[in-house]
Amino acid sequence: MSKKRSKNAGYSGVLASRAVREFLMEAAGERALQVVSEMTEPMSDDDLASVCKTKVSEVRSVLNKLHNYGLADYIRTRDKDSGWYSYTWYTRLDKVKEAVTNKWQEEVNSIEKRLCEESTELFECKRCKKKPKMAFELASEVMFRCNACNAKLKLVNNQKTVKELTEKRDRLARNPPLPEE
C-alpha cells in the first residue's frame, strides 16, 4: 500500500503543474488527466477503463495519443491459446516536462518565424484580395501589379501585427511553462 501511495504522490507532483495539466488535455483530450492519475501502476486498457468508469475506446484513444508523445508505453504479450495480443500500459511521466518544454519552444519558434515574415515590407491587392501578401522582391518583379486583376499593389501596414507578435513572444520568453528546478 505504501508503494502505491508513493507512486501517486509522484504523479500528483507532476500533475500539480498547470502547464502539465493543460498540455496533457491538449495532447490527449479531456480524459487524459483522469487516465494518467488513475494509472498508478502498469495496467491493461480494460482495467484502466473500469477504474476510470469510462469506455475502453476512450481510454485507448488517450493512451495512443500519450504514446505518440512518448508519455505512455506498453508491453505486448500474446496469449498462447487464442493467439490474441494483450497490452499492459504504463506512463512515462518522467518525460512530460521535456514534452511541455518542447511544445513551448515550438510555439516561440513559430512566433519568431512569423515575426521575421511580417517584419519585411509586404504588399497586397486591395481589390481582389485573392493573392496572399507578397514580399517586396516579388512585388517588384510584377511591377507592383496584381497578377489576378492587374490592380496596383498597396503596402501593408503590419506594425500592429508585428507589435502583437513581439509582445506575445516576449511574454512567452518571460514565462516558461515550467519553473527551473
Image: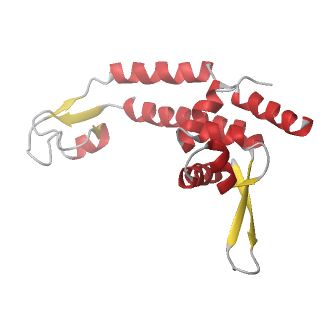
Q: Which residue is farthest right?
A: 2
Question: Left or right of 28: which side holds 67?
Answer: right
Q: Residue at x 64, y 26 (%)?
A: 177
Observer able to see residue 63: yes
The total of numbered circles placed on residues is 0
Q: From the viewer's side, name the closer residue of 67 and 1.
A: 1
24 sits to left or right of 40: left
Q: In the displayed structure, does residue 19 sit left or right of residue 180?
A: left
Residue 155 at x, y percent in the picture = 23, 28
Q: Residue at x 75, y 46 (%)?
A: 92
Q: Check the image and report above or below for 49 versus 157.
A: below
- Residue 102 in view in this figure: no
Residue drawn at (60%, 44%) of the image:
53
Residue located at (53% from left, 41% from top) = 29
Does 43 appear above or below 169? below
Q: How is the image coloured?
A: secondary structure
Against 83, residue 119 (above or below) is: above
